[in-house]
Image (cartoon, rainbow, N blue to C red):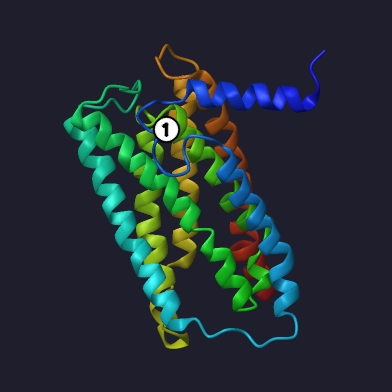
Amino acid sequence: MESTWQRVESLHQWILENGDKRTDPWLLVYSPVPVVLIFLFYLGILWLGPRLMRNRDPVDLKLVLIVYNFAMVCLSVYMFHEFLMTSWLSNYSYLCQPVDYSTGPLALRMARVCWWFFFSKVIELSDTVFFILRKKNSQLTFLHVYHHGTMIFNWWAGVKFVAGGQSFFIGLLNTFVHIIMYSYYGLAAFGPHMQRYLWWKRYLTSLQLLQFVLLTTHTGYNLFTECDFPDSMNAVVFAYCISLILLFSNFYYQSYVNRKSKRS
C-alpha cells in the first residue's frame, strides 16, 4: 500500500509528464513546486508582516503605488489586446473552443498571453504586501487573500494543461476589468483630493460581479454540452466562480447596502 508521500510523488510525476510540452520550458510552469513555495511565502508574509509593522509607522508608498498601478494597467491592456486579437484571428468560438496544442504562430501567441496572465497573478500578490506596509490590515479580508492566493494555482494549471482554448474568455474578461480596476487604484494613489473623481467604485464591484456571472454561465454551458475541452477544468472554474459570486456579493452588500442602511 502506497504511503502518502509516495502518492504525492506519483501525482507530481504525472503532472510533470502530462503537461503542455510547449509551455513546460517557461518560467514557473514545469513543476507545481515553485508556485507552492510562492504561496507558502505569501502566507508567511501575511502572518509575519502585520506583526513586524505593529509598532512601526505606515510606509509612504505613494510614488510606488502610482507607478505599480499604472504599470498593471499597461500590462492588462497588452493582455486584453492579445486575448482579443489572437482569438479573433484564430476564429475562436465563444461557445466551445478546444485548445490548439500545435506550434503554429497563433497557437503559441495565445499560449504566451495565457502565461503572461498567470504571471500577472504572481505580480498581483504585491497588492497584499502594499496593504501590510501601509498598515491597511482591514483590507486583508478573507476575500482578498482567497482570491489572490488561489488565482496563482488556477492559472498555473491553466498554462500547464490548457494554454488556450476557451480559457481565453476568462483572460479576456478579467484583463478588461483589471484595466478599470488598476486605473481606479492608480488615481486613488494620488491622494484624498482625487476622491471626488472616484465615485464609481461601487460600479467597479458590480462589474467584477458581472464578470463572474458571465464566466459561470459560459463555463456552465460547456459542462452540459459536447465540447472538446476538459470537463475537470470547466468544473473547477464553475465552482470557483460560484464562490467568488458569493464572496463579492457579500462584499457589495456590506460595503454599499448595509452601510447605507446604517447611515439612514
Q: Could you say which quadrant of the image residue 72 lies in?
A: bottom left
Compared to residue 228, the image places residue 173 above or below, namely below
| Rendered residue at 54%/58% (across/down) | 125
Of residues 26 and 71, the one drawn nearer to the viewer in this rendering = 26
| Rendered residue at 58%/37% (across/down) | 240
Q: What type is the residue that disc 1 sits on?
A: Asp
73 left or right of 199 in image: left
- Report whether residue 151 is seen: yes
Label count reads: 1
Percent x, y for residue 228? Answer: 39, 14
Q: Quadrant of the C terminus?
A: bottom right
| Rendered residue at 69%/70% (across/down) | 49
Of residues 129 and 211, the one drawn nearer to the viewer in this rendering = 129
125 left or right of 142 in image: left
Mark 1 element type: loop
Percent x, y for residue 127? Answer: 53, 65
Q: Could you say which quadrant of the image residue 102 lies in?
A: top left
Percent x, y for residue 181? Answer: 42, 62
| Rendered residue at 67%/61% (across/down) | 141
Q: Quadrant of the N terminus?
A: top right
Percent x, y for residue 263? Answer: 66, 75
Compared to residue 235, the image places residue 198 above or below, namely below
- Report whether residue 264 is seen: no
Task: List the residue tagged with mark 1.
Answer: 24
